[in-house]
Amino acid sequence: MATNLRVYLTPIPLLLLTYYLLFSGKKATKRNIGHKGRYNGLGNNDRNPECPANFHVVDGSCVRCPRGEFSFQGWIACLQWLDCASIALDVRIRRRIGIPGHLNAVKEVYLADWHGYDVVYSRCASDAYYDDCLHGMKMVEGLQGSEFVVQLIGICYGESLEMVTGYYKHGSAERLNELLEKPVLSEFNTLETRFQLCIDYVQILQFLHNSPLGVRVMCDSNDITKTLSQYLVTDDFHLVVNDLDALPEVRVEEGKLIKCGHRQLFGDFVAPEQLWPFGDSRPFNDEEMPPYDERIDIWRIPNVVDKLLGRVQNSNKVRRLLLGIHESCKQEDPDERPTVGEVLEMFIRVQKLVKSGFKVDL
């Protein structure tokens, strides 16, 4: 009875507006690749352009939704982020995504439905991970407005931490080879597509190192599979960062450095400064472990790029062109490594060469 009464009391104009916003873009199936950043011009003849997600139409142009609002592709206006009540009422869980505890033990993640749209619903796995869940949610919320971050649709800081985000059908980047080996996607298994993903990865790091929330470091990246699982592949084969549960802030000017967790790390994927400096001569003690800064992200770039490039035609040409900058990324002394901006500058130069079919000078 209370639910029915709530419907009756809802102003008719609000119901009509909500219906219009939800279903005005429902027929759109192709992502608009003609707007800002990753998108080119809209075209002079488009009086009512089909805008990408998180954009709406203002005076015949696509404009990003105001902070705290979202849209899906093809909508002409934006809606407020879903709150706790809206998530409980309107988000319907379908099935769990991934293996429980595999790669992400912090959250339970589900494919869900909101008014006919595919979305992702996640909630904290247990009270033991409350702080990590809360941190990740605040990072996703605080970094909205960037094309490099997963789309936020709803967020609830209630008794059970809950979040609703955009659904990306291609999944996370650790499955890239398997994804591109599918016959239906074979046309995308090209050097140009794969190197664009490399560009995206470096651009995301640049964004995080210069984010509105300070210098942020991707700490949950101690092996290649875990690292790639943090990123989702969009429908048009770009990357967005998704898992931000371990994103500490570096403040070098204040002497505030970081440590990625409290356990001893091993292997050559992590930066040298993340390894226990005393070897076997002394047992590991977290209190004696020296802290470090964002340059640990630079160390991992060559490994991630090698994985994203795969073994397509001319990929080894790109590896040779990147050899110098990658050797710089692997300097033992973090002070000798380039900034992510310097890495990106070199990558963009190589990308121009790739797009030209290697017909222009570097």
Image: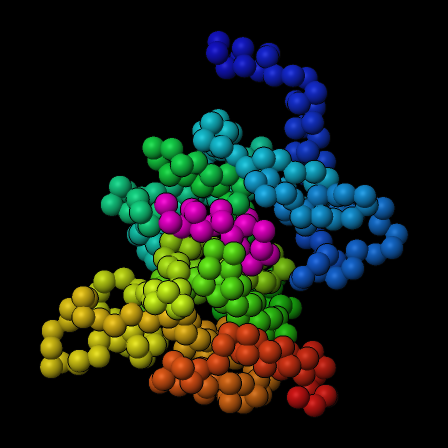
Magenta-drawn segment: 134-151
Q: Is residue 161 above or below residue 220?
A: above
How has the structure been colored for display?
rainbow
Most foreground residue, 283 or 305:
283
Q: Is residue 362 magenta?
A: no
Most foreground residue, 286 or 75:
286
Q: Is residue 282 left or right of residue 46?
A: left
- Asked whether residue 312 appears in the rendered view, the answer is no
Residue 241: give x, y in percent of width and height: 49, 58
Residue at the right extreme, as displayed: 45
Q: Is residue 53 left or right of residue 279?
A: right
Q: Where on the picture, by quarter, is residue 25?
A: top right
Residue that appears at 64% across and 81% down: 349
- Asked whether residue 49 appears in the rendered view, the answer is yes
Residue that appears at 37% across and 65% down: 254
Q: Is residue 351 above or below residue 246?
A: below
Residue 322: give x, y in percent of width and height: 54, 85
Residue that appears at 29% across and 65% down: 259
Q: Is residue 143 magenta?
A: yes
Q: How many marks?
A: 0
Residue that appears at 22% across and 76% down: 276
Residue at the front extreme, as displayed: 254
Q: Where on the picture, by quarter, is residue 147?
A: bottom right
Residue 131: give x, y in percent of width and height: 31, 47
Q: Where on the picture, by quarter, is residue 360?
A: bottom right
Residue 344: give x, y in percent of width and height: 57, 75
State which quarter of the image contains the C terminus: bottom right
